[in-house]
Amino acid sequence: MNIKDKAKTFVNNAKSYWKTPPKGRYMTYREIASLAGGGIGVRIITYCFQQMTISTGNTLLGNTIGIDPLALQLINTIAILSSFPLTALRAQMIDNTRSMKGKYLPYLLTMGLPTVILGSLFLWMPYDSMTLFWKCATVLAFNIAFQFFFSFFNDSYESLINVLSPNSIERSDVLSIRYIVENLSPSIVGIIFPILAKLVTGENTLTDIRIYRYLYPPMLFAGFLVSMIIYVNTSEKIVQAKSHKPKIRFIDAFRAVARNKYFWIISLAGWIGFLEVGFQSIMYWMYEYQDGCSAAQYSVITALVGNASFWPNLVGPILIRKYGKKKILIVTNLMSVGFILSMLPVINMATKPGAIWILLIFTFINQFITALGHLLNPSVNADIRDYQQYITGERIDGMFAAVGLIGSAVTMVTGYALPTIYNRTGLNEATAISLGFDGSNVYDVLNDTGYFINICSVLIIASAIGAALNALPYFFYDFTETKQKAIINVLKVRAMFEDISDGNISIEQNHSEALSIIKESYALAQKPLLTAENKKDLKAVNKENESILIARFVMDELNKFNTAEGKAEIEEARLLASNGPESFIKASLPTKKEIKTWPKENQIQINRRRDALTRLQSVKSAEKVLKKHYRNGIETFETDALDKLYEAENKAQQMFIELSSRIKNCDKSDENIKNYRESLKQIKKERAEIKHSIKVLEYKYSVYSRAVKPYLDAQRILKQAELYADISKYTY
């Protein structure tokens, strides 16, 4: 197919799939284009905030405002500690969000605007007239606010891919497109920023505060406006029953995520590889302190380094399909070690003309390799959230950030490693004074070639060690692409049966895909795995074998109550639900000590042990809630009133949007505009009253569901077992 035919096919596909996704996919081309285009705006905001967020080696905070590395790390410790309650609050808000726009989209709007306002105010504080203490206090105060607003905004954008599609391959493909488009912004900014900086100051420097004051605020507000394309044109698609209501208690969600082994593998990789970023300041230091090149040349270098992240996005989807995420993550980290170490001889020739260009080559290659690994991180994180929903029944994406606070505590400690390395190698006040500087800015030490070479060499070795450590945990990651597809199919089947159990749902209309999954699994599961006769047939055989393995996984789910473990689970459920909501109190359950003796020779037995321990903890927690809130007996909570309020809220929101649109498009002389405004005012009032009523009932529902959780879970198991037993009616 020639270029003309390819272009014609692309145009035809764009027309066909602009509003309707391709078969087997979930995102329309309009959504993909909006996510990628709006991502340019988000990336501009992130680019600016990277300079305003506390970190060792930060150019704006260190070199420009004048806070030394140790002081930066000290206030960073305080900022991390302050992030604990703020992150927990964000997690609780996300996991219990019930909005027409979904879990994450609402926060692009509500957190985006405060973010850009705060960022602009931060830059115009009078740092020149402040002592070191007040500089630290001001930067810290703003960063605590950033911990909530900017982090909420940025995390919502980064996590959005988790819920835009349940298809792991599609998520990887869309991420590749998103990265290609959104990375245009830092690349363009990287080219023009040093040039604009020179126009502002008249010098080859990036350490003048005026540069940031004049350039960043317009960039922030423009980025916010562009990011709203995502808010308007995308929709979330979580595989969940239509009738499902989130009722997630913080501590329960925390425990559930803490049991997710894949979460710990991914997190550990980041925690023990903290040194890997140490070398990233060297290129800038060579330009700023060793006259490595001119401002115009540095603009080109910055653009080329940024461009290194572009190419992996083109080959990434192909490599993922061929090798899988695990192999790519391991190989890229190990290759990174070699290219980082290759920078050592270049640093030793720092004063020679052209050295910075040789350093660029190795930096470019390393950036290319690591960008390939970074491309996978959002997709991997989305996969492990699917796994979390599979093992718990709840979509608790937000809680991953809360449990990740453990990582913040680790970072708080390991964060002192780089400042310590800086200090030990001579980047400190005493050395600066000994070299003839006034000591007010320790980075002046880098003007001395000997210290520059020594400091950079140590950072390179430390970075190589970090890259090697980063690869180790991935050897234990066994969540394959096939398993993820199988889990999504199981979630679709479970959602269908949950809706059947709750009633009033059209199965054919809402769950036709789940019906097809059951029928196909019933037919495929009995087939033996195939063997390829030759290399030509390998691709087709692998595809067929994957379908068979997925079908077997689905049938294992549907037949799970026929196993010895499944039958035991049914008996326990009957004990917990036999005599009403309070029956679980008197149920005779196995103790924790007894459960620990159960066999764990296969995945079914492992799941059985895990579920039994979770159930035991659930009973203990429920008994505490009963004693606190229902001393005189349980009052059954009916959800009908809450459902009606949700419906009323949706109608009020739709009316609000419609009236707002009418007012916006209405001519000021139109006599109806007054009526529209009065109606809008009334709708706002009604919506506020509905929200208040929902909040009151949701609290009561939360207390009730926590108090009788073992009973509700047991009812769900018994109903699921009953429906699974009658599976034959869904296979024809």
Image (cartoon, helix red, strand yellow):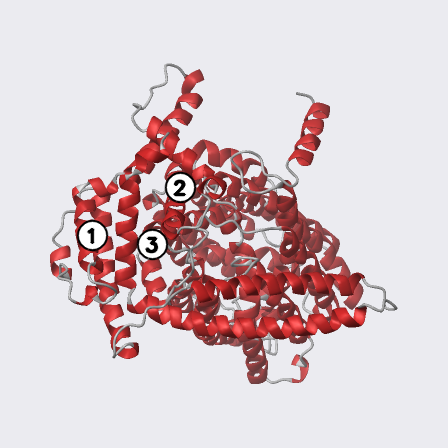
- Disc 2 marks a residue whose amino acid type is Gln
User: Is 45 in front, or is 353?
Assistant: 45
Contact flag, marks 2 and 3 (Cβ < 8 Å): no
Dot 1 alpha-carbon crowd within 10 angstroms: few under 14, some 14 to 19, many 20 or more: many
Secondary structure type for disc 2: helix
**Residue 319 rendering spot, x and y as whole percentages:** 49, 34
Inter-mark Cα distance, 2 to 3: 15 Å
Q: Compared to 290, does 79 lie above or below?
A: below
* Quadrant assignment for the N terminus: top right
Circles 3 and 1: CB atoms closer than 8 Å: no
Q: Position of residue 379 (x, y in %)?
A: 48, 46
In the picture shown, does residue 655 fall above or below 337?
A: below
List the residue tagged with mark 2.
484
Q: Label 3's element? A: helix
Quarter residue 192 falls in: bottom right
Residue placed under numbered mark 3 in the picture: 392
User: What's the distance in space between the residues labelled 3 and 1, CA to CA?
Assistant: 14 Å
Task: Please say whether residue 644 is visible from this viewpoint.
Answer: yes
Distance from disc 1 to disc 2, alpha carbons, whole Å, reads 22 Å
Which callout, 1 or 2, points at the residue further toward the start of the chain? 2
Within 10 Å of disc 2 (Cα), the crowding (few <14, some 14-19, many 20+) is many
Q: Earlier in the sequence, mark 2 or mark 3?
A: 3
Residue to which mark 1 is pinned? 609
Q: State the image coordinates of residue 500 (x, y, percent, origin top left).
A: 38, 47
Q: Nearer the viewer, mark 2 or mark 3?
A: 3
